[in-house]
Image (tube, grey):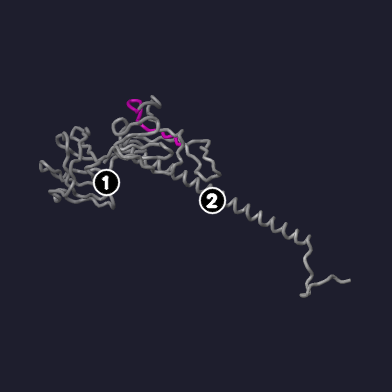
Amino acid sequence: MSPRRDSGGRAGHTLPELAVALLLAGIVGAAVLGLLISSTQAVRQLVARSDQAEVRRTVSALLHEELSVGVAGRDWRVDGERAVRLRAFRGYARICSDDGATLTVAWRGQRLPDPTRDSVLVLAADGRWHAVDLAWEGAPPEPARCGHLAEEGIFSERAGGWRLSGAMPEAPLLLRTFEQGRYSLEDGAFRYRQGTGGRQPLTPELVAAASRLSAVSVGGEGGRGGLGGPAGQGALEVELHLLVPQGMGGIRVPPAYPDRWIVRGDPAGPQGRPWP
C-alpha cells in the first residue's frame, strides 16, 4: 500500500523528523547566542580598558602640568597619603606701567584673572617671589605702554589693569596668577578642589583605596624621601590602583600590578617647563 497523503498531495512530517529539526535549530541558536555573549564581553572589556586608560592619562597629564611649573615645599606639598595641595598657576603678566594705583599689564593664561579666587606672585629684582592678593581686574589705564602684544592663539597677550593688595616689593619684574588647589585620589576618583570649594571628580570612579601620592627626592645621592633639598629635586610618586568598572560581571577587582610613576616638581628639570 502507498503512504496516505493529505488533500494537497504531500506526505506529513513524522515525529523523529520534527525532533531532529528542533535539535538542529537549538544547536544553531546556542552557537549564535554564544557569539553574541562573547562579542558583548569583548566590547565591555574594551570599554573598561578605555576607561582605565583615560583615568591614567588624566591623572598623569594634570599632575605633570601643575607640578612641573612649581617648586616642592614652596608651591606644592603632599597632604596626607592621597592628596597634594598646590598653587595652581593660571597665567602670568609683564608690567607695562604703574600709575601708583593700577598696574597696566600684558597678561596671558588659561583663563581670565579673577579677584575672587586668584592671588599673585610678584618676582622682585632680588630674584625672590612675593605673594599678594589680586584686588581688582579691569580695563588698563595705559594700554599703549604695553607696545606690541604677542599673538600665540589662545595664549596671546592681552592688556589689562590690575590692582594688587599686599606688600609690593620694589622694582617688580613679573607677575604670576594662581589659585589655591588640591588634587586627590579619594572617594573612588581623581578629584580637584579649588580653594575651600567642593571636590569635583575629574575621572570616572575607578580609583581604588590603595592608591597613594607620596613626596620623594630624585636626582641626588640621598635617594628617595622628604621633599628634596641638597640631596635631589622634589618630586611626587604616584601609585595608581584602578578598578574594573561596574557591569563587568558584577565584579570590581583591582589589577594585579598597579601603575607607579614619578612626577617631577622642578620647573628646570627634564620633565619640567622653564618658568616664564
Q: Position of residue 276 (x, y in %)?
A: 26, 41
Query: Is 68 above or below relative to 223?
Result: below
Q: CA distance from mark 2 to mark 1?
A: 40 Å
The residue where tag 1 is placed is: 109
> Relative to the observer, which residue lies in front, 74 or 82?
82
Q: Position of residue 148 (x, y in %)?
A: 19, 51
Proximity of marks 2 and 1: CB atoms separated by less than 8 Å:
no
Q: In this picture, which residue range is highlighted in magenta?
A: 227-240
The amino acid sitting under disc 2 is Val
Which residue corresponds to the image point at 75% horizontal and 58% vertical from the top-left? 19
Q: Quadrant of residue 233?
A: top left
Residue at the extreme top: 222
Which residue corresponds to the image point at 29% horizontal and 46% vertical from the top-left? 110
Number of residue marks: 2
Q: In terms of sequence position, does the residue under pointer 2 or pointer 1 come before the other? A: 2
Which residue corresponds to the image point at 43% horizontal and 35% vertical from the top-left? 261
Q: Quadrant of residue 25?
A: bottom right
Q: Is residue 44 magenta?
A: no
Q: Residues within 10 Å of mark 2 (few under 14, many from 20)?
A: few
Q: Nearer the viewer, mark 2 or mark 1?
A: 2
Residue at the extreme left: 100
Residue at the extreme front: 7
Q: Is residue 238 magenta?
A: yes
The disc at residue 43 is 2
Q: Residues within 10 Å of mark 1 (few under 14, many from 20)?
A: some
Residue at the extreme right: 1
The amino acid sitting under disc 1 is Gly
